[in-house]
Amino acid sequence: MILIAERINGMFKDVKQAIAEKDKQVIQELAKKQTEAGAAYLDVNVGTAAADQEGTMQWLVETIQETCSTPLCLDSQKPDVIAAGLKVVNAQNGLILNSAPLNKKADEEILDKYVEMAAQAGPKASIIALTMDKNGVPQDIDTRVAIAAEIVSKATEIGFDARRLFIDPIILPVRVPNAQVQPGNILAAIDQIGYLADPAPHITIGLSNLSQGATERSLINRIFLAMAVSRGLDSAIVDVLDEKLINIVATAEMLMNKQIYSDSFLKVYTAGK
Amino acid sequence: MILIAERINGMFKDVKQAIAEKDKQVIQELAKKQTEAGAAYLDVNVGTAAADQEGTMQWLVETIQETCSTPLCLDSQKPDVIAAGLKVVNAQNGLILNSAPLNKKADEEILDKYVEMAAQAGPKASIIALTMDKNGVPQDIDTRVAIAAEIVSKATEIGFDARRLFIDPIILPVRVPNAQVQPGNILAAIDQIGYLADPAPHITIGLSNLSQGATERSLINRIFLAMAVSRGLDSAIVDVLDEKLINIVATAEMLMNKQIYSDSFLKVYTAGK
């Protein structure tokens, strides 16, 4: 499981304050702790508060890179903010650009832009592609899978390997009733996206979004994560500092035979990260 | 989810001792506690220690029925022990005969015997049918699904509704490596068994068997249960006194849209049992 650590995000109070005060220590501590907990990538999101988003992205990237070499996941809906991060990021060990819809308007091929930036960043740069298009987030599963297919075909057409794509089927909060896009239906989408190419693209979700505003948040997140791993989900943006969540990932992968059972399978999993 | 409570089983020390000493209170306490915890059925298994298995089954059934009217699940591989229980059991609210393989020898149609006993016990009596036959437990998934298909077709041929069948795909301990019958493959079997008839048979598993001899037993049981519910598992023989396990069932069913989300969904689930 490719775990993308979610905590370096200006939406969290401590990070927001650290950005405002240019307090490197808070950011570097989070980078180290998340790396030790098993993060394959550290998500970097400036949040909405920073006036100079491009400068803030660069400051965050440089601050993290001073202290650890864990691959980063530059997280912004604005290509200019991603581009700013790209100027200073070290993509040698890996990089993800997070995230692009297929397109935003009929005449704006936003996916192409992200694919191009990733291609220029080097052979280890990937992108997270959202199953949404100019009409927004689809209100049904079939359209999501259709958009995922279009993303895969567009990327591979221009020579961008499907294995460098992380398709995100966009999970909605369980608290908001939506008959078409229930969590169970997202599982079906994950199933199907796994068959879009061979070798298949990665599939990722922003897990915490599922339980937005709900009670029993961790229980909901954990149970859904277990279900999704059993359908082929191989990546997620999560709180890697939640040890119980990591144990669930380890157990789910062991049950799906991605790790052999041994009496110390939980430790073996964490040690392997 | 149809929860079958596993604790009244002579394999557990306290029950074994209660049987030996004809101590009704231990049995009746377990019956009441498991009913309050949400058991739809109480499994009744005399274990292997009792010399008079038929008499012990009758004593257990009568002892439980003195104190509560929760439907019972008579659990024995010996038709004579089941038959003894049937003489005293009240099947008005429901009953399960647990469990029959398709057959044991080429000339012994054991499933037929259980179906016949269930049919005679009344319209609310069901059976748990194991996906095994004269060759024992199949070492692959396809054979299990094929046996399940034969079970469904045999039962319905003689007028026994598929909805009165609980098909058990037989989960093996994760600790014992078996390339063909990994837990992940059992999930695929559950998926397929759901399509064998319309309306579909129930699907059940003896969950605890999965973690036999393993470390992290409850974690393993819980994660697999969540995955299996997402594939259509609608029954399980479990420790209903494990409150966390019940919360996981409630969360899994809510995520699969079998229960609408509300802030008190855990309480709503337990109250509905």
Image: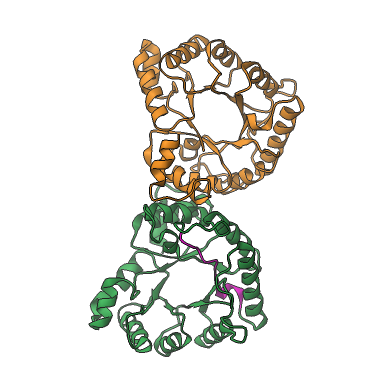
Chain colours: A orange, B green
In the foreground, A139 or B177: B177
Give the answer, above or below, for where A233 lies relative to A134. Answer: below
Query: In x, y percent, where is residue B219?
Result: 39, 51
The magenta span reads: B161-173
Give the image location of residue A204, x and y in percent: 56, 36
Quadrant of residue B240 in the image?
bottom left
Quadrant for the C terminus of chain A, please. top left
Residue B203, x across and y down, in percent: 54, 66
Q: Residue furthest right?
A: A157
Q: How many marks?
A: 0
Q: Is residue B129 above or below residue A57?
A: below
Determine whether, in the image, residue B200 is placed left or right of residue B10.
right
- Specify whether A115 is left or right of B84: right
Of residues A161 and A51, which is closer to you in this image? Answer: A161
Q: Is residue B109 visible?
A: yes
Q: Quadrant of residue B191?
A: bottom right
Left or right, B158 with respect to B91, comes to right
Q: Residue at x 55, y 73 (%)?
A: B136
- Judge from the rendering whether residue A22 lies leftward or rightward of residue B195; answer left or right: left
Report the front residue among B63 and B222: B222
Q: Is residue A92 above or below residue A164?
A: above
Residue B28 seen anywhere in this rendered image of the structure: no
Residue sitting at 37 percent across and 52 percent down?
B216
Residue B165 falls inside the magenta stretch: yes
Q: Is residue A247 located in the magenta-colored stretch of the structure?
A: no
- Percent of width and height locating residue A32: 38, 24
